[in-house]
Amino acid sequence: MKKFIKLRSSKGWIVVLATLIGLTFGGYSFTKNAVSTQVYVTNCGKLDYKPSLIIKFCADAGVLISHIEWSSWSADSAVGKGAYEINDCQPTCVAGKVHHADIEIVLSKSKLIQEKRALSFITIKSKDGKNLPLSNSPIDEWPLELAG
């Protein structure tokens, strides 16, 4: 108790109080900025942060990107790699064969969706330069907010 009274009567209490206020305000600012600068991607109508799976056709998940690993993620774009999977639906989608390809992924076109910053466009490219399975091109792209 004597230490507290001595501290209170000295100028040291101002330093202690200023430090506590600074730490509290700094922590609040850091947390607020981290949450407000979070960038999402629309994935089947839901905002998702750094998804490991993106579905092109949400109704049947007949085309999707899985095993995604992100090498960069910012408010303007995201870059990663993953596996492109497409079901040939022959003779039916239930009995169809799933074809795979290793791909590079780029997300772009940042915009506000549901009052949150989101990357709204995806471009994929086969890693080996060959055409994507069941496609005449090594590249595919689509707006994410309209997927499904």
Image (cartoon, rainbow, N blue to C red):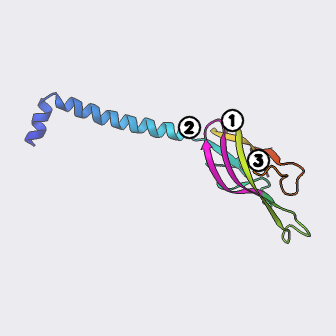
- Alpha-carbon neighbours of circle 2 within 10 Å: few (<14), some, or many (≥20)? few
Q: What residue type is labelled 2?
A: Thr
The disc at residue 124 is: 3
Q: Residue at x 25, y 33 (%)?
A: 17
Residue 125 shows up from this direction = yes
> Which callout, 1 or 3, points at the residue further toward the start of the chain?
1
- Alpha-carbon neighbours of circle 3 within 10 Å: few (<14), some, or many (≥20)? many
Find the distance from the CA under tag 3 to the CA under tag 2: 25 Å
Residue under label 2: 37
Quick one: SS at disc 3? strand
Does 103 lie within the magenta span?
Answer: no
Residue 51 shows up from this direction = no
Image quarter where the N terminus lies is top left
> Which callout, 3 or 2, points at the residue further toward the start of the chain?
2
Between 58 and 86, the residue placed more toward the observer is 86
Q: Which residue is drawn at 70% across and 42% down?
A: 107
| Residue 53 drawn above or below residue 105 | below
Q: What residue type is labelled 3?
A: Ile
Instruction: Residue 77 in the image: state x and y as whole percent.
Output: 66, 38
The disc at residue 111 is: 1
Part of the protein shown in magenta: 64-84
Does 81 lie within the magenta span?
Answer: yes
Q: Residue at x 84, y 68 (%)?
A: 97
- Alpha-carbon neighbours of circle 1 within 10 Å: few (<14), some, or many (≥20)? some
